[in-house]
Amino acid sequence: MLSNLGNSLLFLNAIFSFIIIYFSSKSIKSVGETIPSKIFKISLIQTSFVMSCFFTLVAAFIISDFSLVNVYENSHSEKPLFYKIAGTWGSHEGSLMLWIIILTIFSFLFLIKNKNHPKNYRLYTLIFQNIIILGFLFFILFNSNPFATVSPVPKEGLGLNPILQDPALVIHPPLLYIGFVGSSIYFSAAMASLVTDYSEKQFAYSIKNWVLVSWGFQSLGILIGSIWAYYELGWGGFWFWDPVENASLLPWFAMTALFHSVIVLEKRNQLYFWVITLCLMTFILSVTGTFLVRSGILNSVHTFASDPSRGVFILIFLSLMIFSSIYLLFKKYKTSNSFINSNSKETFVLINNWFMLFYLLTVLIGTLYPIITDALTNNKISVGPPFYNAVIFPVVAVFLFFMAIGPNTKWIKNKFNDIKNFLFFLASALVINFLIVFFFKSYTVISNLIIISSLFLIISTMFDLVKCFKNSNFDLARITSHLSFGFLVLFIGLNHNFSIEKDFNLKVGETISFDNYEIKLKRLSLKDFSNYKAVIGNLEVKNMKLGEVNILSPEIRIYDNPSTLTYEAAIKTNLIKDYYLTMSNIDRSEFYNIKFQKKPMMIWIWISVIMLSLGGFLRVFKNANNN
């Protein structure tokens, strides 16, 4: 029986964690720098058993074993195989199994990939990582068991939430979890560093690739989630500051500050406690996001079902992590005697860190403030895009200038020899911005600053690219990431300023005109699919100015298992803009509400994030080759 097999594997994995902690503690007290081979073997067996446990759950979903509560609540025998498998991590219990897999794999890989580092440092990292693994194993076993059974066995399952039945949602959770769950390994390494006083450049070498890998996957995970929300939820944009979106963004800010600080620790043996603090903060923020998503205190389409007992368990575990890491940090903290020149690359990294912490605190306050207000005053409020745009946008404009100048400064003490170049870059950015305003339309001062600063970063980075080719000193990773970030902000600015949104009601045969557009609801059709029925609209969108005609077909989907209505956007994408249409019926009348949006540069926003992530992975490959 799969339930017995799965539970047995979970208990065995808990036992393996205890054994690893015991033998690691024993080995720390022994003489010599060699880690006993049995620790490697037990860690490998643990990883194999965790994988086997997960595939046992996958098998239960594939064969529709409705004796398991998890399968019963999140699958159906008529679901396509693709979505049966995705249901494994589409639920709270199954997604926690994915957590355990990533925690365990990273633990094993860190053990075998860091052979050049001190024995005690590696063993303490292994101990702390297995304490985390035990925490989540206990959570699964006693609160969120994916192998819990139901009796009598139902003949049919309830089905997976229809909005989760999407290819993007199959790959979004694994990518995101590799990012923020992967940060556990440098949390454990930071704790081990504090215990063993392993704080030199070699510590930076031991964690830098783990930070970059988690950052790269976190970026891709956020991207896929954003694309899914764009076409599946009918929001019509790339980001809506939804609380669960914010929960994934918080550790990303900390990771970004962290890998820049690691560079300083590696090159100059400075900012050690910045590195330690950010290592601890990143995983703590990841667990905080998990608490917000799984406790039921957030109101979001992304959250798992509300269960206060889950929240209490995670909150206790989170509190233990915070207090133990703070205690160890303050116990070991000592003021650095090394002097950092205000005119140096190190200072610009510190400036980057403070910017990232500002963004992090802004998003954290915006996410938590409604929860606190609701708890204290019983008044429900929401903090939306206007707050974040007003607070973050002006600061981003300043940040981009520092981001362009920083890479061109020198370590220890810098001489500003590039002032003429920077003035040229600024003049070029101003001219391009003026042309945009002149040929299209005027917009706000903040919008101008965002576009000018992003152009400044783009031009400066492209100039760096030319210099690197000439000097054969080609930092492709940094240039790719910085150039991509500049384009990302530029395209977001253009998207924000030149979007068009209209909301109107039509019945079949009617036409509406506005600006340079004419939209006609030509007809409706009903079609059966294997998993749902759909009412499909046929709308003609004419751009009268360009003489352009497009046919878009938004859908109203009717699912039976579970019984749900969803509204699928119709999107026409090209290199310049997206046309975006959603359709919903008004009180079963002959009228349909149509939401039309023109979204410039959407595809380039997605491409910019992909290239941004690529820069991180290029750095990993460069580090691997150098080592």
Image: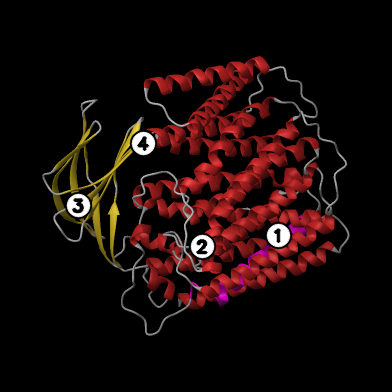
Among the two numbered marks 2 and 4 on one chain, the one whose residue lies closer to the N terminus: 2
- Pair 3/1: label in front: 3
- Pair 4/1: label in front: 4
What amino acid type is highlighted by mark number 3? Tyr
What amino acid type is highlighted by mark number 4? Ser
| Magenta-drawn stretch, dominant element (helix, strand or loop) | helix
Among the two numbered marks 3 and 1 on one chain, the one whose residue lies closer to the N terminus: 1
Among the two numbered marks 3 and 2 on one chain, the one whose residue lies closer to the N terminus: 2
User: Can residue 44 be found in the magenta stretch?
Assistant: no
Q: Which residue is mark 4?
A: 499
Report the disc number at residue 10: none
Q: Pointer 4: residues within 10 angstroms few (<14), some, or many (20+)?
A: some
Report the disc number at residue 592: 3
Estimate the spatial distance between the alpha carbons at disc 4 and disc 1, rounded to whole Å. Answer: 56 Å
Residue reaching furthest to the bottom = 152
Q: Position of residue 539 (x, y in %)?
A: 19, 42
> For this rendering, which residue is in front, 445 or 203?
445
Estimate the spatial distance between the alpha carbons at disc 3 and disc 1, rounded to whole Å. Answer: 63 Å
Q: How many marks?
A: 4
Q: Pointer 2: residues within 10 angstroms few (<14), some, or many (20+)?
A: many
Secondary structure at numbered mark 1:
helix
Among the two numbered marks 2 and 1 on one chain, the one whose residue lies closer to the N terminus: 1
Q: Mark 4–mark 1 contact, CB under 8 Å?
A: no
What amino acid type is highlighted by mark number 1? Phe
**Magenta segment range?**
120-147
What amino acid type is highlighted by mark number 2? Val
96 vs 416, left or right, is left
Estimate the spatial distance between the alpha carbons at disc 3 and disc 2, rounded to whole Å. Answer: 34 Å
Estimate the spatial distance between the alpha carbons at disc 2 and disc 4, rounded to whole Å. Answer: 31 Å
Among the two numbered marks 4 and 1 on one chain, the one whose residue lies closer to the N terminus: 1
409 vs 614, left or right, is right
Report the disc number at residue 40: 1
